């Protein structure tokens, strides 16, 4: 998996531990998504991998930076 940043925190919106996953494009613009950390281990690693891939796909499509939904 390429470069991503993970910020772990308590999400008041989700009501659980969460991670903000961010990927940056060549201009330094951030694409991000918040995911629940209710699962752990292999299941969380798979969710993180899929999320990072979706963020990279958004960059490659030329989507606007910001939250990827």
Image (cartoon, helix red, strand yellow):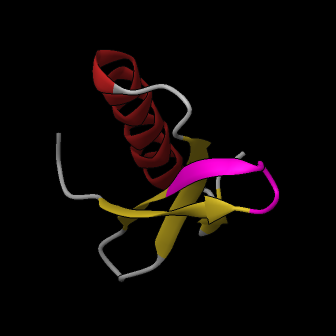
Relative height, residue 24 to residue 40 (above, below): below
> Which of the image's four quarters has the N terminus?
top left
> Which of the image's four quarters has the C terminus?
top right
Q: Is residue 11 left or right of residue 61?
A: right
Give the farthest residue toward the right. Answer: 13
Query: Who is closer to the viewer here, 54 or 46?
Result: 46
Residue 12 horizontal/vertical position (percent): 78, 62
Relative height, residue 62 to residue 35 (above, below): below
Q: Is residue 64 left or right of residue 29?
A: right
Q: Is residue 12 left or right of residue 17?
A: right
Number of numbered discs overlaid on the protein picture: 0
Q: Is residue 6 left or right of residue 61?
A: left
Residue 54 horizontal/vertical position (percent): 49, 37
Quadrant in the picture for residue 47: top left
Give the farthest residue toward the top. Answer: 43
Which span of residues is magenta-colored? 12-19
**Residue at position x 36%, y 69% in the image:** 24
**Residue at position x 62%, y 57% in the image:** 63
Quadrant in the picture for residue 41: top left
**Residue at position x 53%, y 47% in the image:** 58
Relative height, residue 43 to residue 63 (above, below): above
On whether residue 21 falls in the magenta region, the answer is no
Give the farthest residue toward the bottom. Answer: 28
Query: Is any part of residue 23 visible from this angle?
Result: yes
**Residue at position x 56%, y 32% in the image:** 38
Query: Who is closer to the viewer here, 44 or 63?
Result: 44
Residue 18 horizontal/vertical position (percent): 56, 51
Query: Is any part of residue 64 visible from this angle?
Result: no
Quadrant in the picture for residue 5: bottom left
């Amino acid at each position: 998996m390429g470069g991503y940043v993970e910020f772990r925190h308590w999400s008041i919106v989700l009501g659980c531990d969460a991670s903000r996953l961010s990927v940056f494009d060549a201009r330094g613009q951030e694409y991000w998504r918040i995911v629940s950390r209710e699962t752990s281990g292999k299941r969380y690693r798979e969710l993180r991998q899929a999320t990072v891939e979706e963020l990279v796909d958004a960059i490659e499509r030329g989507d606007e930076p910001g939250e990827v939904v």
